[in-house]
């Protein structure tokens, strides 16, 4: 079946530190991959996406590259800010039905 | 603002009761999804509708049901409520059914006492 596995949190970093949140997937076909972010008290927002192998999604300094050979879509940011404190969800969507499969979420806290 | 609206924002009720949560998708979006988010279960997909028809079912209990109306708004009905149903319920919408990103509403926080 289809599933997403992401690294467990919580993750605590100092401001300006480098961030990596690992995400791997299992899919029966060729999925699109997404990272969503949930700020405290809010719904999920799309952070970035990639629709095919070797695509790189990027937004707000965050990046993730769709790696088909390792079935991964790791989220990275070179220098985190306190405002990046949130829960990050990796997700995949297949090209039929558009059902999303979400990871369990990784909580990130950035301290000044 | 995602353009997806959900009402009510908060709901407090008692065990055994029935509640209805409402969602209005973004203008033009045909698909609506319902999710349950709790501390111990994470984000769970419940059900998807596309243009009024059920398209996919996830971990939705038999006590729960949903529908999408001709104007594309959707309702999630939760009955015979239990303490464990206390959670955030999110609605999301997307344009169609292929590779479209989902836009999430702000959620309804349900507390069952």
Image (cartoon, rainbow, N blue to C red):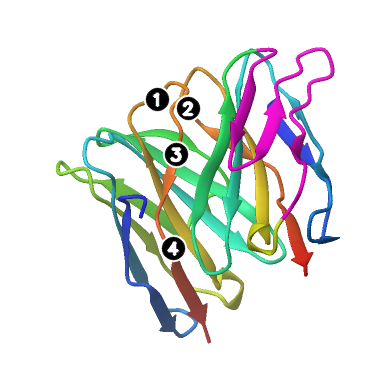
Residue B97's disc number: 1
Q: Do tags 3 and 4 sit on the same chain?
A: yes
Quarter where residue A40 is shown:
bottom right
What chain is tagged by disc 1? B
Gap in angstroms between the C-alphas marked 2 and 1: 5 Å
Q: Are marks 2 and 1 in contact (CB under 8 Å)?
A: yes
Q: Main secondary structure of the magenta part?
A: loop
Residue B50 in the image, given as x and y percentages of width and height: 32, 33
Q: Residues within 10 Å of mark 4 (few under 14, many from 20)?
A: many
Q: Residues within 10 Å of mark 1 (few under 14, many from 20)?
A: many
Residue B107's disc number: 4
Q: Earlier in the sequence, mark 1 or mark 4?
A: 1
The stretch of residues the image draws in magenta is: A53-80
| SS state under label 3 | loop
In this figure, which residue is indicated by the disc labeled 2?
A98
In this figure, which residue is indicated by the disc labeled 3?
B102
């Amino acid at each position: 079946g289809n599933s997403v596995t992401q690294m467990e949190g919580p993750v605590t970093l100092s401001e300006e530190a480098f961030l990596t949140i690992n995400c791997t997937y299992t899919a029966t076909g060729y999925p699109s991959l997404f990272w969503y972010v949930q700020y405290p008290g809010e719904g999920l927002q799309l952070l970035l996406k990639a629709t095919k192998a070797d695509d790189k999604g990027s937004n707000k300094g965050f990046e993730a590259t769709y790696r088909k050979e390792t079935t991964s879509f790791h989220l990275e940011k070179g220098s985190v800010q306190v405002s990046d404190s949130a829960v990050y969800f990796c997700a995949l969507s297949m090209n039929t039905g558009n059902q999303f499969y979400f990871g369990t979420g990784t909580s990130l806290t950035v301290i000044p | 603002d995602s353009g997806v609206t959900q009402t009510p924002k908060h709901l407090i009720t008692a065990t055994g009761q029935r509640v209805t949560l409402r969602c209005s998708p973004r203008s033009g979006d045909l698909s609506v999804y319902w999710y349950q988010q709790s501390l111990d279960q994470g984000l769970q997909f419940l059900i998807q509708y596309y243009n009024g028809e059920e398209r996919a079912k996830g971990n939705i209990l038999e006590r729960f049901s949903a529908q999408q109306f001709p104007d594309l708004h959707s309702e999630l009905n939760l009955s015979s409520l239990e303490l464990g149903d206390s959670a955030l319920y999110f609605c999301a919408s997307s344009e169609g059914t292929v590779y479209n990103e989902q836009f999430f509403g702000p959620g309804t926080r349900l507390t069952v006492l």
